[in-house]
Image: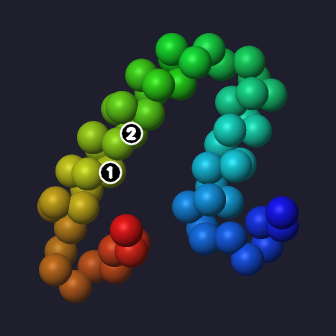
Amino acid sequence: MSLENAPDEVKLAVDLIMLLEENRVSAKTVLGALDIIKRDYENKLKNAQPDAPRSEE
C-alpha cells in the first residue's frame, strides 16, 4: 500500500514509528512520551485562537 495518498496523520505516524524503531526506543518509553505529547497538543487545541487553523479529526 502506498502512503502517497494517505492522510497526513498516517504519514506522520509511519515516520514516527520508523524513527522510534530505528533508535530502539522501548515501548514503555514511547507510550509515556505519547501520553505527554497528547496532553500537550490537546491543551494547544483548547487554547488556540478561534481563527487559528486546526487539523480535522
- Quadrant (top left/top right/bottom left/bottom right) for the N terminus: bottom right
Q: Which residue is mark 2?
A: 37
Q: In terms of depth relative to the viewer, which is nearer, 51 or 2?
A: 2
Which residue is at a point 76% across and 38% down the rendered structure image?
18
Image coords of residue 35 (percent x, y): 36, 31
Amino acid at dot 2: Ile
Which residue is at a point 35% across and 32% down the rendered structure image?
36
Residue neighbourhood size for the residue with mark 1, other residues' Cα within 10 Å, grouped as few (<14), some (14–19), many (≥20):
few
Q: Considering only vertical position in the picture, is 6 above or below 26? A: below
**Does residue 2 appear to the left or right of 15 in the view shown?**
right
Q: Which residue is mark 1?
A: 41
- Tell me how far mark 2 sits from mark 1, CA to CA: 6 Å
**Does residue 3 appear to the left or right of 44 in the view shown?**
right
Tell me the SS state at disc 1. Answer: helix
Tell me the SS state at disc 2. Answer: helix
Q: In terms of depth relative to the viewer, which is nearer, 44 or 25?
A: 25
Amino acid at dot 1: Tyr
Which residue is at a point 68% across and 30% down the rendered structure image?
20
